[in-house]
Amino acid sequence: MARIAGVNIPTNKRVAISLRYIYGIGPQNAVEICEKLSIPLERRVNQLTDEEVLRIRELIDREYRVEGDLRREVAMNIKRLMDMACYRGLRHRRGLPVRGQRTHTNARTRKGKAVAIAGKKKVTK
Amino acid sequence: MPRSVWKGPFVDGYLLNKAEVSRASGRNEIIKIWSRRSTILPQFVGLVFGVYNGKKFIPVQVSENMVGHKFGEFSPTRTFGGHSSDKKAKRG
C-alpha cells in the first residue's frame, strides 16, 4: 500500500490507473506522471520501489494541484460567480444547470431526484 | 471555442466614450447601455451601468472581478419566482 497526496491508498493496479484515484489526476495526468518519472506503464503499484513512490509524491506535490487544494479552488471559483450575481452565479445558487442545458426535462444531476407534484392527475387509459 | 486573443476583447466602441464622459463629469450617475454583448474592461471598474434587460435598466456596480465577463451576464432577462404551492388546495 502506498500513500500518495494525503489519504489516497491506491491498490495493486497499474500505476497509471491507481494514480487516478487521486482527486485532480485523471487519465492524462496519470500517464504524464509515469512518463516524467520513466515508470513503465505495465508496472503495478506494489512493484514500485520506495524511492519511486517518493519521487511520485514529490512530483505531485510540486507540479499538480490535487485533493483539498483543488476542491478549495473550485469552490472559490463558484463562490466568486455567486458573489458577483452574474447569470452563472444565479444558476449555481438555484442548483440548476449552468451552461444553458434544457431544464424542461432531464437536468436531474443538478436538480436532484424528481419530486412528485402534489395533485397532478395521473394519465389513465 | 473561445475568442481569438489577437482580436482583443469585444466592446461596442461608444461605451468607451460614455464611460469617459461619465468619469470626466465626476457625477456618479447610471450609464444606460443596451450593449449586453460588450466585455467589461478594467477602465469600467467603479462605474455604475444600467444594463437593459429588454424591459428595465438593471443597475450594475462594476467591481474588479467582473472584468472579462459580459454586461449581459449581470442583467437577467427572465423572471421565474418558482412554482406556486397552493395547487393541492385548489383541487380539494
Image: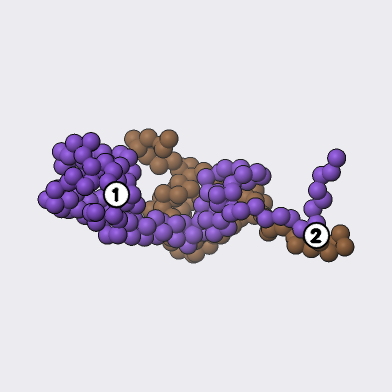
Chain colours: A purple, B brown
Residue drawn at x 48%, y 51% is B18
Residue B9 shown left or right of residue A35 in the figure: right
Q: Chain of mark 2?
A: B
Report the front residue among B66 and A68: A68
Of badges 1 and 2, the one in the foreground is 1
Residue A124 position, x and y percent, is 84, 43
Whether residue B43 is visible = no
- Identify the residue position indicated by label 2 in the image: B87
What number is the disc on residue B42?
A: none
Residue B43 shown left or right of residue A113 in the figure: left
Q: Callout 1: helix, strand or loop?
A: loop
The amino acid beneath tag 2 is: Lys
Report the front residue among B51 and B65: B65
Residue A42 position, x and y percent, is 23, 36
Residue A115 position, x and y percent, is 67, 55
Residue drawn at x 29%, y 54% is A9
Report the front residue among A26 and A14: A14
Whether callout 1 and callout 2 share a subunit is answered no
Q: Chain of mark 1?
A: A
Residue A65 shown left or right of residue B57 in the figure: left
On the rendered image, what quadrant is the C terminus of chain B found in? bottom right
Distance of label 1 from label 2 (alpha carbons): 54 Å
The amino acid beneath tag 1 is: Thr
- Identify the residue position indicated by label 1 in the image: A11
Residue drawn at x 23%, y 54% is A2
Whether residue B9 is visible = yes
Residue drawn at x 66%, y 44% is A104
On the rendered image, what quadrant is the N terminus of chain B found in? top left
Q: Callout 2: helix, strand or loop?
A: helix
- In the rendered image, the residue lying farthest to the left is A51
